[in-house]
Image (spheres, grey):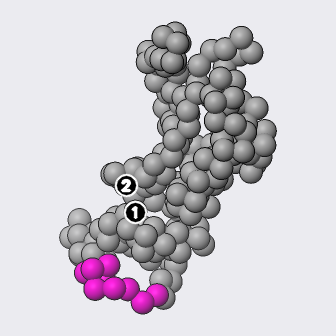
Amino acid sequence: MADLVNDRVDLAMDKIEPELLAALGRPRAEGALRTLFSYCGRPLDREFERDESGYFVAFADGRRRSQRTFKYAPTTTTSPKGVCIWTVNVVQTNNGLRVASLKAGRRVSTEPFTAASPPASDPDAVMATLNAYRRRTITADSAAKVLVDQIEGGRSVNVQLDTALEAALRREMDRRRSQ
């Protein structure tokens, strides 16, 4: 993950399982990785979420290797923290642990993003939230929670809102007033 954060795809290729890299070829493997960047953005941090073990990778010749999976939910160049999940599957080789597969996907539920709303002093929180809402990676209700946090923290939110987000903002403000 560190190589991806540092935009060193060339170094990341050295960590791929040798048989997989040989089968794909280095240019094709690099292209596949860059395709993940275009889908989910390049990771900007290594926000570790969890790891899993006990699965196996089956090879064409019938061999099986135990696999360990690491999941990350980083901020990326296109998404706020927790929206894109990067899954790194590693296997043991003669040269240590190597990447057997790498996937990036959008989280179906965006609750981890709203549960950890950016601090009121975060100048990028409003834009990141509005961009995520515009891309439909978070709902109007989720965006409203972050926007109200910003407003309550003293930050001005001077943007044009669509009808759904404006209604969600009113609901969230009413909900907080009634508490």
Image coordinates of residue 160 in percent, x first then y, are 42, 90
Residue 161 part of the magenta segment = yes
What amino acid is found at the position of numbered circle 1 in the picture? Thr
Quadrant in which the C terminus is drawn: bottom left
Residue 158 part of the magenta segment = no
Q: Residue at x 58, y 43 (%)?
A: 47
> Disc 1 designates what residue?
137
Q: Secondary structure at mark 1?
A: loop
Image coordinates of residue 164 in percent, x first then y, are 27, 80
Q: How many marks?
A: 2
Q: Decide if residue 110 is on the left or right side of residue 49.
A: left
Q: Secondary structure at mark 2?
A: loop
> Disc 2 designates what residue?
110
Identify the magenta region: 159-167
Query: Is 111 rendered above or below residue 55?
Result: below
Q: CA distance from mark 1 to mark 2?
A: 7 Å
